[in-house]
């Protein structure tokens, strides 16, 4: 059995403080994310925030793996603060959705979960 995944660190270290704070605030938030991720390979990532970011923004999976291999910089260094801010809003939306789904005992497949999280508000 592998060790529990840490909440922050890795590729996204320092990039999404609101996401980290939300996950640390209540264990139910972390459990809700893991519930939403039931069919995903979470343990290939160095942190839950890496997982959430790379599985919502799938185009960042390869740069994340390259970071793990020490071939790419940390996300917070590599992109603008405007991009980080926009992504963090979406990740917070995803976490809120995960909590709502778990409270309602709804099972939502990751693809639908991801699409809903990425959908513009309005």
Image (cartoon, rainbow, N blue to C red):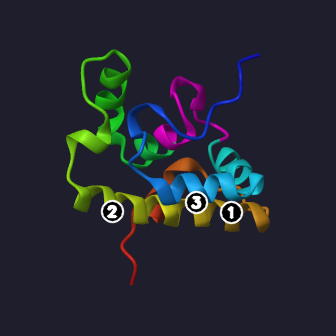
- Element under disc 1: helix
Q: Which of marks 2 and 1 is nearer the N terminus?
A: 2
Residue at image x 76%, y 55%? 28
Q: Position of residue 98 (x, y in %)?
A: 63, 59
Is the Cβ of the residue at disc 1 closer than 8 Å to that at disc 3? yes
Question: CA gap, disc 1 to disc 3?
Answer: 6 Å
- Seen in the image, is 72 located left or right of residue 108? left
Q: Nearer the viewer, mark 2 or mark 1?
A: 2
- Count of picture labels: 3
Span of residues in magenta: 38-51
Q: What residue would you read off at disc 2?
A: 85
**Image mark for residue 99:** 1
| Front residue (pair 58, 13) | 13
Quarter holding the N terminus? top right
Does the stretch in magenta take in 47? Answer: yes
- Element under disc 3: helix
Does the stretch in magenta take in 107? Answer: no
- Element under disc 2: helix
**Image mark for residue 95:** 3
Up-down: is 37 above or below 82?
above
Local packing at callout 2 (Cα closer than 10 Å; few below 14, some 14-19, many 20+) is some
């Amino acid at each position: 059995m592998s060790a529990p995944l840490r909440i922050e660190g890795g590729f996204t270290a320092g990039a999404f403080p609101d996401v980290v704070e939300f996950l640390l605030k209540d264990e139910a938030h972390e459990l809700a994310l893991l519930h939403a991720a039931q069919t995903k390979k979470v343990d290939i990532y160095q942190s839950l925030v890496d997982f959430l970011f790379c599985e919502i923004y799938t185009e960042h999976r390869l740069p994340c793996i390259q970071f793990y291999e020490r071939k790419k910089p940390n996300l917070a260094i590599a992109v603008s603060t405007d991009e980080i801010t926009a992504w963090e809003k979406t990740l917070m939306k995803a976490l809120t959705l995960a909590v709502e789904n778990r409270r309602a005992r709804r099972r939502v497949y990751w693809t639908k979960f991801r699409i809903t999280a990425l959908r513009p508000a309005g």
